[in-house]
Image (spheres, rainbow, N blue to C red):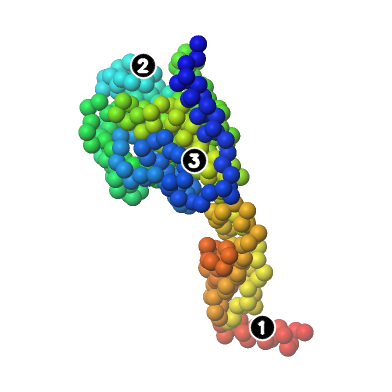
């Protein structure tokens, strides 16, 4: 028989999953009922914080730590220091990891890609340490790299003691919801990560060992792209949940929830909040009218802009004004790629962004020989 507590939890989850009315509330950090110690909702494209509660409170992150582990692995892949088909030999240290694991044996070999799958999908601690040792030479060296990278990303309230987030024997392994959002944003720049974080079920060891994603939002939340869950008795239930709709990619970080159900429902609540209130305005890459050039062998130069994505309140796209501002007295010589102006974007009279206008060809400066030649062609050959 279902008891009253279970009924209350089910009712709470139903309420939390209802999309929020975009016009119902003003933006502040107290308007939502948040069942977590700390949360952040961030736009992955711009890093803008859209909602927060205690965003800088230092807390244990559990396996959400592995976002940094994965970031360093993907950076090593991009730099060519390791490859997905490299075979990693498992050390006794890696095989000794408790908690979530794929039960690696000392001396066992597994390719980098299968270890990544194991870490991303099943949150395998043994797989994380095996990767850390392969990239860093030792877990200690890898942890040094983790902390160095955290400083580079501006994660000023973070210190890592291991590559997994296991915290039975740690006292300083702490981070914040905001810092987690920062490293999540950086990891998402490696687009291939979502090839793994969106997998619901998979296998390793030639199909002999099954993996099931610890992030249930991947299956049940529209647009979910990842990213990483975590839980320990110290940390409670944590998640960095990411989702993308219509070009808007959001990061919802939850720390210190009491249960996985409340954690997931809170992540959904924040994501719904973001998608209901914000959108991405895109002014696509387009050719512009040629720009006049003085002292050049041609009178005009072809130009274009890169395109610009801007985070705006939902429904405000029609209010955006674009103003083309060219540099004064554009003179040759010009090189392909030289900036000759900008497009200024305004929303309700306020500047919200700027997009460079640049040359798509080179223009040489007039010289004496060219001038004489052009005069000859004009008056003698015609």
Comes first in the chain, label 1 or label 3: 3
Using the image, determine if residue 347 lies above or below residue 258: below
Q: Which residue is mark 3?
A: 270
Q: How many labels were placed on the picture? A: 3
Report crowding for label 1: few under 14, some 14 to 19, many 20 or more residues within 10 A (C-alpha).
Answer: few
- Residues 79 and 259: in front is 259
Whole-percent x, y for residue 20 in the image: 56, 41
Asked where in the image residue 284 lies, by quadrant, the reply is: bottom right
Whole-percent x, y for residue 135 in the image: 33, 34
Comes first in the chain, label 2 or label 3: 2
Comes first in the chain, label 1 or label 2: 2
Whole-percent x, y for residue 270 in the image: 49, 40
Residue at 53%, 66% (x, y): give it.
351
Q: Residue furthest bottom?
A: 379
Mark-to-mark CA distance, 1 and 3: 66 Å
Residue at 30%, 17% (x, y): give it.
106
Mark-to-mark CA distance, 2 and 3: 35 Å
Report crowding for label 2: few under 14, some 14 to 19, many 20 or more residues within 10 A (C-alpha).
Answer: some
- Helix or strand or loop: what does disc 2 sit on? loop
- Helix or strand or loop: what does disc 1 sit on? helix
Q: Which residue is mark 2?
A: 103
Whole-percent x, y for residue 181 in the image: 41, 43
- Residues 18 and 184: in front is 18
Asked where in the image residue 141 lies, by quadrant, the reply is: top left
* Residue 121 shown left or right of residue 235 in the figure: right
- Mark 1 vs mark 2, foreground winner is 2
The circle drawn on residue 374 is 1
Mark yes or no: residue 128 visible.
Answer: no
- Residues 348 and 21: in front is 21
- Helix or strand or loop: what does disc 3 sit on? helix
């Amino acid at each position: 028989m279902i008891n009253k507590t279970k009924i209350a939890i089910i009712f709470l989850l139903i309420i939390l999953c209802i999309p929020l009315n975009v016009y119902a509330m003003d933006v502040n950090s107290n308007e939502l009922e948040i069942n977590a110690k700390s949360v952040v909702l961030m736009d992955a494209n711009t890093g803008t914080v859209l909602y927060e509660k205690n965003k800088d409170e230092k807390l244990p992150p559990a396996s959400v730590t592995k976002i940094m582990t994965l970031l360093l692995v993907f950076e090593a892949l991009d730099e060519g220091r390791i490859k997905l088909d490299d075979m990693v030999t498992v050390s006794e240290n890696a095989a000794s990891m408790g908690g979530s694991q794929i039960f690696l044996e000392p001396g066992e070999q597994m390719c980098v890609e299968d270890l990544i799958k194991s870490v991303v999908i099943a949150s395998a601690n043994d797989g994380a340490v095996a990767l850390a040792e392969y990239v860093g030479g030792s877990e200690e060296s890898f942890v040094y790299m983790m902390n160095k990278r955290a400083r580079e990303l501006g994660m000023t309230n973070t210190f890592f003691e291991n590559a997994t987030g296991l915290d039975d024997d740690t006292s300083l392994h702490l981070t914040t919801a905001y810092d987690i959002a920062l490293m999540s944003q950086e990891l998402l720049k490696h687009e291939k990560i979502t090839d793994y974080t969106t997998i619901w079920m998979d296998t390793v060891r030639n199909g002999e060992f099954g993996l099931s994603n610890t992030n249930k939002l991947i299956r049940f939340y529209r647009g979910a792209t990842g990213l990483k869950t975590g839980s320990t008795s110290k940390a409670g239930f944590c998640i960095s949940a990411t989702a993308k709709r219509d070009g808007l990619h959001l990061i919802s970080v939850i720390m210190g929830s009491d249960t996985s159900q409340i954690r997931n429902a809170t992540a959904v609540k924040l994501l719904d909040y973001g998608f209901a209130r914000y959108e991405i305005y895109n002014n696509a890459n387009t050719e512009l009218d040629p720009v006049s050039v003085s002292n050049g062998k041609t009178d005009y130069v072809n130009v274009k802009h890169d395109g610009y994505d801007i985070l705006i309140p939902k429904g405000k796209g029609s209010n955006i004004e674009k103003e083309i501002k060219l540099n004064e007295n554009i003179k040759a010589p010009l090189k392909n790629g030289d900036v000759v102006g900008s497009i200024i974007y305004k929303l309700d009279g306020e500047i919200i962004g700027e997009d460079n206008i640049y040359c798509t060809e080179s223009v040489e400066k007039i010289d004496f020989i060219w001038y004489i030649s052009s005069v000859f062609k004009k008056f003698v050959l015609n």
